Image: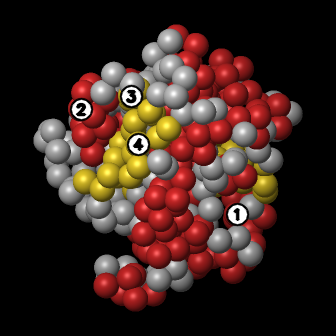
Amino acid sequence: MEKLVGQTPLLEIKSLSRLIGGSVLAKCEFMNPGGSIKDRAALQMILDAAESGLLRPRNWIVEGTAGNTGIGLSVIGKSLGYRVHLFMPKGQSLDKQNDLSFYADKLSLVDPCPFSSDEHFYHQARIYSEKHSNAWWANQFENLSNFKAHFENTGPEIWKQTSKRITCFVSVAGTGGTISGCSNYLKNQNAKIKVFLVDPKGSGLCSYVQSGEFKSEGGSITEGIGIMRLTENFKKAKIDKAVSFSDSAILSLMRYVEREDGIKLGGSSALNLLGAVYAGKKMGLGQTVVTFLCDGAKRSAARFYNEDYLKEKSIELLDFEELVSAIV
């Protein structure tokens, strides 16, 4: 199973390429065996922990997750002979919850609460691992194997697949591993490559990059991206500019790409493509912008493709002109 992780193809999003007068390319991370980009970090964390002796045969892998990392740890970990116990906050997408229940050996749902509380799902995973000698806590936010996965694999793939012509790299961030690993590798190859962080409203990462302070504005129905604290992985990111977008813009971009390109998107993928258009417009004609389709649309279908849910959240879709204005 681990041999199927990575080497995902680059797909041109033609409608968006026309919009920026350049190329918008997205790596199809939904083609990883666990269905998302998080498979990369999951594999690297497991391999490094096993090599160091922290993770021993038949041990339990323990993690707090909003969805995709837990699925990756389950699919890859179980194929390598480990058992998996996940802690997930209640209220996440039912699609992701069902997937976690299907793949993991054990899923514990935790009431949402502030990060400062020991009842937070992140801390519940840590506390469980501290109490059980046969459990290893993956700790995706602080574990630098996450960064390593993208520095040693994802970044080089992008550089090779674009024949070294990439001019701009765009990514959302949750743990920070993807944007930090890729930005470091790509800027090592060509310091002129620009790196854009794209954030949902309600996250503080955009504010942190811009001002050095974590401040949030509004909220978002997206999951697994955005955060209000500085992780060891995100500390290593090399970012030139950060921008945030509303749920209205995210949903409108989803509908636009579905209509124009026949591609259904998940929330993080749509946000990445918003950032790609923003970056291309800001940098001028002829750019080669690379980002990710982080996972498939099905894991967020119960929210993003549920008209009743969107009405409940008072999210209004924008027309094309409004969408372009929101982007630039």
Q: Which residue is rendered at x = 54% and y = 53% of the image?
A: 103
Q: Which quadrant of the structure image shows residue 57?
A: top right
Q: CA distance from mark 1 to mark 4?
A: 40 Å
Q: Which residue is mark 2?
A: 127
Give how far apart the Cα atoms at labels 1 and 3 are. Answer: 45 Å
Q: Could you give the CA–CA distance between mark 4 and mark 2, rounded to whole angstroms?
A: 13 Å
Question: CA separation, marks 2 and 3?
Answer: 10 Å
First of labels 1, 4 by sequence position = 1
- Measuring 13% from the left and 41% from the top, which residue is drawn there? 117
Residue 165 seen in this snapshot: no
Asked whether the viewer can see residue 132, the reply is: yes
Question: What is the x, y in percent for residue 138?
Answer: 43, 30
Which amino acid type is shown beneath numbered disc 4? His
Which residue is farthest front? 58
In this rendering, the label closer to the viewer, 2 or 1 = 2
For marks 2 and 1 on the same chain, the one whose residue lies earlier in the sequence? 1
Say if mark 1 contacts mark 4, CB within 8 Å.
no
User: Helix, strand, or loop for circle 1?
Assistant: helix
Query: Where residue 291 sits in the image (x, y, percent)?
Result: 64, 47
Foreground residue among 67 and 149: 67
First along the sequence among labels 1 and 3: 1
Residue assigned mark 3: 135
- Label annotation for residue 85: 4
Q: Secondary structure at mark 4?
A: strand
In the image, which disc is placed on residue 16?
1
- Looking at the image, is 280 positioned above or below residue 234? below
Helix, strand or loop under label 3? strand
Q: Is residue 21 left or right of residue 206?
A: right
